[in-house]
Structure formats: structure tokens, C-alpha cells
Amino acid sequence: MKAIRPLLLSLTICLLSLIPARAQTVINAYQPGVTPEGAIYFLPKTAIRVTVQVEKTSYQPGDFCKYADKYLRLRDVQQEPATSYRITRVSMTPIGLPDKSKAYAVQFNARSSAANVALSDDGVLLAVNAEPTKAMLPAPFVPARRSDKISPRQFMTEEILTAGSTAKMAELTAREIYDLRENHNLLIKGQADFMPKDGDQLRLMLSQLEEQDQSLTSLFKGITIRDTTEQSYVICPDSTMEKRILFRLSQRLGLVDSDDLSGTPYYISIDDEHSVPPVIEETNSKKKKKDENGLYVNVPGRMRVTLYNGNDVMATEEMAVAQFGHVELLSGELFNKRWTTHLWLSPSTGAVERLEAEQPK
């Protein structure tokens, strides 16, 4: 999805007279914020970005796994490769998408003060006479750097490498591991034949012994590698939603399609909290807001979003949502020549976040 990056349109429109534009006309003639009459903007609809982090665990048995119990007393060591997946983190973030059913035109009006209109790249109104609020999006996911794999063979002695059988190689490797551990303990106790001269050299020698020990031991107990990936799903609700399948997770295959029965289903439910009273339509045409001048903004409602793993609740969050509210008109009197009005709108809901007015000097 395209990120919302503010596009500031410095329009010397001797402020705002705003009227609703017909949706089809606006969409066909729409360019990024500019028309011969002034500018066109959209109000946003609220979508939910669900971000899932999945950890893949891969196990590869070591060459001497059959001898792990005999020589190193490592019990229940797997002797077959295996791969598994699990979810480590789930987060939900509201984001704004242009609602092309809520398109409005900014027209010239000589009786109003000049204004700077800030639109996103996709035409959503963000601010008037102000720097727009930046959308609070999570930091991009960066996978952890995998350490370079060290081959255990580089730590094998000549005697191990020239052994006549795998069993003999395993026995000699186990002896080498015990020698490494003994030298490690002697260094810690200060009883080694060749003690280091200072603390830095001691730490280096201990680190090298531990690295050799771990590398050779992996020939018996195998190697486990963990990788984490991230996947995002965007849901834009127009109404309540009851346990819709968002994705499926297979322990052997990872994230799979929602219709792939090899994976366990994870569901999303969305409930309208009915926090905004319904709008009562005016019957008197003189009072209808569409005939008034001003700026249209959203008055969002609230929703409760719940994620399920089967019947178990994974996460629940409440957030504002434009679709479950209504559109309100800010009077054009806010933008007359007597005042310089600064307006900030929420990028995800189109609601007024802040409104400031000052008299020009």
C-alpha cells in the first residue's frame, strides 16, 4: 500500500468555499488536488493493518546424532530434519485510505483569507494552513542478521579426519570436546599451563574455546536455525464483521491462503460500538448543510477489533473508524479574513485533531 506522504498544495485561494462534488465527476476529473476551480480532496475511510510476525524453526541433525547419547550423554536428540512455524507477534494499526464517495471541492472565494491545503499523495485532506500530522506507523521490520555459519570440520584434528569410520570419528570428536571443556575450566580457575597476560586475552581465549566446543557439539545435537518474517493484512470494514478468516497458519508450511485447509484458521471480528448518534436529516432546504460554505470533516465512530486463534482471543483493541460515524461541516466563517485558522485532521479517520485561530497582525 502506498504510504501517505504529505503533498503541500499552496493554493492562493482567497479562502475556502467548499461544496460537495458529485462523486463520478470528481473521480473522472481528479488530479492530485488541483482543478481549474481550486482543489478537490477526499476524506479518508479507516482500514486496519494487521501485522503478523512468524518464526520459522529449521532443525538439521548432526553427522554424529546417533552417537549423541553414547559419547556426550545428550538424550532424545532428533535424527530427522524438521521445520516448524509459530506466530511470535501480532499488532493492529489504523490507517487511512481515500474514500472516493466523500469527495469535496475547494472553490475560490474573494471574501476569504488565503489558505495552504495539505493533501496526501492519494488526495486525502490532512491540514489547512498547517504542517500535516504524520501517520504513526510502526517501524519497518528488519530481520535479524544471521551469523556466519562455521564448519565444524575446521576444528577437527588430523586424527579425527583420517579415522576409518563414522563411529570412530564420533568417538575422537567427543574426546576433543572434553579436552576443550577441560582447558576452558583450567583457564577460568587460573590453572592452565599458558595463562593469558591480561583480561582481554583471557576473554578472547575463552571465546575461542566456546566457539570450538559449540561447533563440534553441533555434530551430535544438530543445528537449529530460527528466521522471522513479517506479513501484513489490510481490512477495510464497511460494517460489522463476525469471525472472518484473516489467514491460516500451517506448522509445516507457514502462512497459507485462507482457503488452504492445511493451516489453522485465524479470525478477525469487528464490532460497531455505536458511539456516534445517527444524523437527523434537515427537511428545510435553507438549513441543509450542502448549501452552506465550509470544510467537510469526518466525525468518526468507534469499533472493537478482535483477533482469534480458533475460539481463543489473541488480541482485542478499540479504535476510531470513519465509516461508523458521519460527515460534519465546519463553517466557512472559521476561514474569514479576520482570522487565520490552522486545522489538523487525523490521517486515519479525517477527524479534527486540532483547531487553532489567530488574528492576522
Image (cartoon, helix red, strand yellow):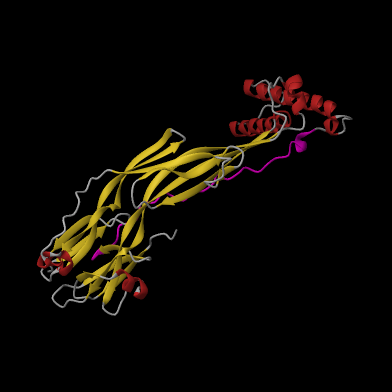
Looking at the image, the residue that sits furthest to the bottom is 36
Q: Position of residue 154 (x, y in %)?
A: 76, 38
Looking at the image, the residue that sits furthest to the right is 164
Q: In the image shown, does 193 or 114 lie closer to the viewer? A: 114
Q: Residue at x 47, y 49 (%)?
A: 232
Is 94 displayed left or right of 90 in the figure?
A: left
Q: Position of residue 55 (x, y in %)?
A: 55, 40
Q: In the image shown, does 213 or 358 lie closer to the viewer? A: 358
Q: Quadrant of the N terminus?
A: bottom left
Q: Quadrant of the C terminus?
A: bottom left
Q: In the image shown, does 291 or 4 lie closer to the viewer? A: 291
The answer to whether one can see residue 141 in this image is no
Q: Position of residue 181 (x, y in %)?
A: 69, 24
Q: Position of residue 256 (x, y in %)?
A: 56, 45
User: Which of the 4 image quarters holds residue 11?
Assistant: bottom left
User: Which of the 4 image quarters holds residue 57?
Assistant: top right
Q: Residue at x 85, y 30 (%)?
A: 159
Q: State whether residue 256 is above or below residue 102.
A: above
User: Which of the 4 image quarters holds residue 10?
Assistant: bottom left
**Number of on-image labels:** 0
Q: State whether residue 353 is above or below residue 18.
A: above
- Magenta residues span 128-156
Magenta region, mostly helix, strand or loop? Answer: loop
Is 47 displayed left or right of 59 in the figure?
A: left
The answer to whether one can see residue 145 in this image is yes
Q: State whether residue 54 is above or below residue 234.
A: above
Q: Residue at x 32, y 54 (%)?
A: 348
- In reply to whether residue 89 is colored magenta, the answer given is no
Q: In the image shown, does 220 or 206 lie closer to the viewer? A: 220
